[in-house]
Image (spheres, rainbow, N blue to C red):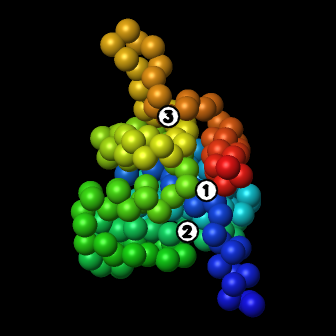
Amino acid sequence: MVVKERVLQHAWPYVAVVGPSDPEPDCYELAMEVGRLIADRGGTVVCGGLGGVMEAAALGASGAGGPVLGLLPGRDRADANPYLTMAVATGLGELRNGLVIRTSDAVVAVGGSWGTLSEVALARRLDLPVFSLRGWAVVDHLGLAVDGPVTVSTAAEAVDAAVQAVAGRRAQ
């Protein structure tokens, strides 16, 4: 029974926190707050396991006592940032972005880079809820928003929206 309770405790929600490996200082702070808030709400942070936004989210979550899963691009777990609860060395390079997204119930993108855009695009293609905090917005040729990430203004808004979206999907 203890094992089942432990599994259920960390079964929901898994929220990917994605963003640049070399973010602006304000994005690093925002990602740290996002990680902390995910942990405070009983969630698991999923990330790419390296530096920048990934490290900041892991630091925030682990500092709040929450679990953090890092899916590394290389084959060496020693490359992981020190704040992960569990590091998986995939050996897949950038293809590990697909694992980060497929493992998650929702995505919070903090800042933007090409790798972040690939994760946002894959998540939307899979119909996962994506919330963008100082990052990518998707517009059509007229500059009108399309079915891309939902733009949010604060870490709390991002995490609240992600947790509510996951809860809504689970209730269906």
Residue 62 as seen in the image, left or right of residue 116:
right
Q: Which residue is pictured at 73% across the width and 81% down the height?
A: 5
Label annotation for residue 149: 3
Q: Is residue 44 left or right of residue 69?
A: right
Quadrant showing the N terminus: bottom right
Q: Amino acid at mark 3?
A: Pro
Classify mark 2: helix, strand or loop. Answer: strand
2 and 3 marks in contact (CB < 8 Å): no
Residue at 72 percent across and 63 percent down: it is: 42
Q: Does dot 3 land on a helix, a strand or a loop?
A: loop
Q: Which residue is mark 2?
A: 68
- In the image, taking residue 102 as reference, residue 15 lies left or right, namely right
Q: Earlier in the sequence, mark 2 or mark 1?
A: 1
Q: Quadrant of residue 43?
A: bottom right
Q: Nearer the viewer, residue 165 or 77?
A: 165
Amino acid carrying mark 1 in the image: Gly
Q: Position of residue 130 (x, y in %)?
A: 52, 41
Task: Report the residue at 63% width, 69% height from top.
Answer: 11
Which residue type carries mark 2? Answer: Val
Label number found at residue 35? 1
Of all residues shown, which one is farthest toward the top? 142
